[in-house]
Image (spheres, rainbow, N blue to C red):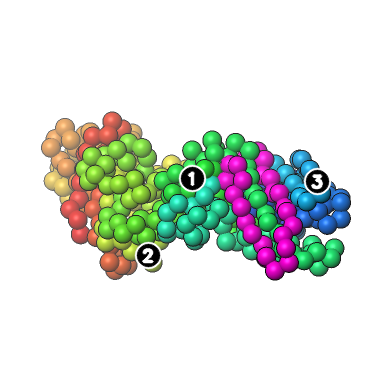
Amino acid sequence: MAESGGGGRSAQLKHTGLRHGWTTGACATAATKAAYTALLTGAFPDPVTITLPKGQTPAFALEREELTADRAMAAIVKDAGDDPDVTHGALIRATVRALPPGSGVVFRAGPGVGTVTRPGLPLAVGEPAINPVPRQLMRAQVAEVAERHGGTGDVEITVSVDNGEEIARSTWNPRLGILGGLSILGTTGIVVPYSCSAWIDSIRRGVDVARAAGRTHVAGCTGSTSERTVRTAYALPEDALLDMGDFAGAVLTYLRRHPVPRLTLCGGFAKLSKLAAGHLDLHSSRSQVNKPFLATLATSAGADAALATAVSEANTGLAALELCQSQGIRLGNAVAERARDEALRVLRGAPVAVDVICIDRAGAVVGRSEVR
């Protein structure tokens, strides 16, 4: 499939009908190439084409451009395709200024781009939140432009995002210690619709930050209600709370390689019943509550045949739970215990002790497992 698209328009993915998009890193790279070209030649290439890590060559239209005697700025509107990306439509700017020979490439955080304030991320404290792969892409484009147009390649690149600080409030950045704005992200340059790669990457960075801070207990929470439950139960600091969402598998597989001594999983009963049944993606479109499985757990917890049948025919997971609660059967505990065991299976012997807390929609604890 050709990944190049005129004017930065996203291309349609085969078989899905969905358009992929471009990462903030790809947009910043294209803007950098356009700005540095203008600084050396006096003219902005529009559209500007870059080469991504896997060889794709997308073209991006410039939204804005400015050129003075000592610097050039180019701006590109991010198109995330059909992915529900919070940075879709954001204006990504790169301002390039020539530096004395031997200075190399220096990165700065402009308005709307965050600064790293905690250890554990792939960037040093005090660095602008421009991730390693986008930095590599920008350096490569600077070198290419310098060779083509007679520059030295010694430049300062300031990346900014209009309204980036406001947008960043709806991301993990504040919790990760990235303050002042967004991160410039991307490993391939491409946003795949509904891959949720940015969320999964944030889970991994959350684990990294917790480990760097010396945390020995972290919690994977499916939402704000479960997060409040964990805070009440364990008084964990903010940097020990992982916004797991539906991605239990992402938490577990990353902790398998980067262990923390203890993990608490907390979430709604229905979601965690999916983990108990072996699903690592808990989203309603990708896994369903298995009522016959719940009936089997209810039987193991002491339910008679009539109750087990009622559980297997219940409309929802919570309805099944309520049926059991009405007869004193601790289905919540059974689900929590099986979910813990499934988590341990995924961890494959990594030195991580696990416990699970199930809650209802109001946040009341309806099931718990012991730590194992």
Q: Taking 63 as reference, is 306 left or right? A: left
Q: Position of residue 67 (x, y in %)?
A: 80, 46
Amino acid type indicated by mark 1: Leu
Q: Nearer the viewer, residue 167 or 290?
A: 167
Q: Which residue is mark 1?
A: 179
Q: Which mark is residue 37?
A: none
Q: Which element carries disc 2, helix, strand or loop?
A: loop
Q: Which residue is mark 3?
A: 67
Q: Nearer the viewer, mark 1 or mark 2?
A: 1
Span colored in magenta: 84-113
Q: Nearer the viewer, mark 1 or mark 3?
A: 3
Q: Taking 209 as reference, is 94 left or right? A: right
Residue 253, placed above or below residue 292 = below
Amino acid type indicated by mark 2: His
Q: Nearer the viewer, residue 89 or 56?
A: 89
Q: Is residue 140 magenta?
A: no
Q: Position of residue 10 (x, y in %)?
A: 71, 47
Q: Which element carries disc 3, helix, strand or loop?
A: strand
> Visible in this render: residue 193?
no
**Are the two marked residues, 3 and 2, in contact with CB atoms closer than 8 angstroms?**
no
Residue furthest to the front in view is 100
Rounded to the nearest angstrom, the CA distance separating label 1 from label 2 is 25 Å
Q: Position of residue 144 (x, y in %)?
A: 77, 65
Q: Which residue is mark 2?
A: 258
Residue 260, placed above or below residue 329 = below
